[in-house]
Amino acid sequence: MNASAGVKSEGLDLTSIPERIQSEVQRAIQRSIKGVEYIASSGPALGSTPKDILAVRGTMNLYHYRPMADEIYRIPILIVMATTNRGYILDLVPGQSFIEFLLKRGYDVYMLDWTAPKPEEKSLGMEDYVLDFIPDCIRRVQQDSGETDVNVIGYCFGGVLSLLYASIFNDGPMKNLICFTTPVDFREMKLFHNFSDRRYFDVDKLVDSVGNVPGDMIMTSFDMLRPASRAFSQVQLWDNIWNDEYVKGYRMMDRWGSDTLPLAGEYFRTTVKDLMWDNKLFNDTMSVGGRAANIANIKVPILHAVAEHDHIVPYDAAKHLIAKVGSSDKEEVMLKGGHVSLVAGANAIKRLWPKLDSWLGKRST
């Protein structure tokens, strides 16, 4: 009998077992050490790209990021964030920051970011965001940059607000519009639509009772889209806790995902009634502060980037945007990734960021 065959059984190399055991023991030790380090330490500093605060008013914050290139495109960019999320998802850490990427490519970047509305700001409505906050920021960007034209980038519901602004001020200073994962057909936001079913969900009672809608309630609704994802991600964290780069990425995304903002009561009421219930944006019957907001009135060049595996804004909810706007220069691009990985992380660095730079650069001179 061959001696080497005696240490093999149906393809299993028995001589490798001690090495594999040793490897697993070492990994278990590293997990324990790194687990203690994880508990004892804080995550990486986020949103650290140098910037100046141009304005703070109510829940509105306007930032101007300091240039990083010798030559700057003429037309500045105003990024409009979703009202539920912090803007640092676009400015994670050096090398993984969309803001840093834009600055190094020569863009002049501003951001409209949000803070939690105070109890006395519960009466802020859709008209405050679309007819006041965004126009105010546009004016401040014009004054600070010295340019009349402004490019706008809207992420998720920031894209919805940007569409509403562009449809009302269709002869205004907006030069180009870029939307990331922006819904227009709210019937296709299936689970959110079911959560807010008017037969069971009394939005008036909720808003009249609590004022601003708590961030924990908003975050729970996102978690319910994938109920097991949080537990699964924690299991993955433990499996990979010995890997410093994995832990760093996990902490960045987990912090941002847990940092969900409350929504002003009247703004939430309008979102539910006009968008979720009556689907007015899709049906061309939307109005804001008594002013018609038909996105067919938008004529500026527009790029809409959607994610192939977006569980928050499914493609069916976003796919009608390009068809409905009145622009002649318009493009939709579908990229691999999810709702967040489309704009942040290694996937975004490889796919979305270069595409945006290619599209916007030639339209920003």
Image (cartoon, rainbow, N blue to C red):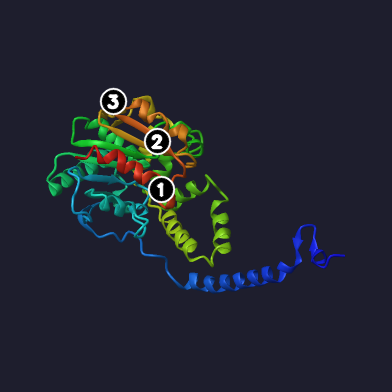
Q: Residue furthest right?
A: 1
Q: Position of residue 348 (x, y in %)?
A: 40, 48
Mark 3 to mark 1: distance in Å? 28 Å
Query: Which of marks 1 and 3 precedes in the sequence?
Result: 3
Front label number (1 vs 2): 1
Query: Above or below — where is 5 with respect to 219?
Result: below
Q: Which residue is mark 3?
A: 328
Front label number (3 vs 1): 1
Mark 1 to mark 2: distance in Å? 14 Å
Q: Nearer the viewer, residue 184 or 7?
A: 7
Q: Quick one: label 2, few (<14), some, or many (20+) residues within 10 Å?
A: some
Q: Quadrant location of residue 365?
A: top left
- Asked if residue 156 lies left or right of residue 173, the reply is right
Q: Which residue is mark 2?
A: 333
Q: Quadrant for the N terminus, please.
A: bottom right
Q: Which residue is mark 1?
A: 350
The residue at 76%/58% (across/down) is 11
The three-letter amino acid code for the residue at tag 1 is Lys
The residue at 49%/73% (across/down) is 37
Q: Position of residue 332 (x, y in %)?
A: 38, 33
Query: Which of marks 2 and 3 precedes in the sequence?
Result: 3
Query: Above or below — where is 169 with respect to 21?
Result: above
| SS at badge 2 | strand
Do the residues under discs 3 and 1 have CB atoms within 8 angstroms? no
- Asked if residue 354 lies left or right of residue 346, the reply is left
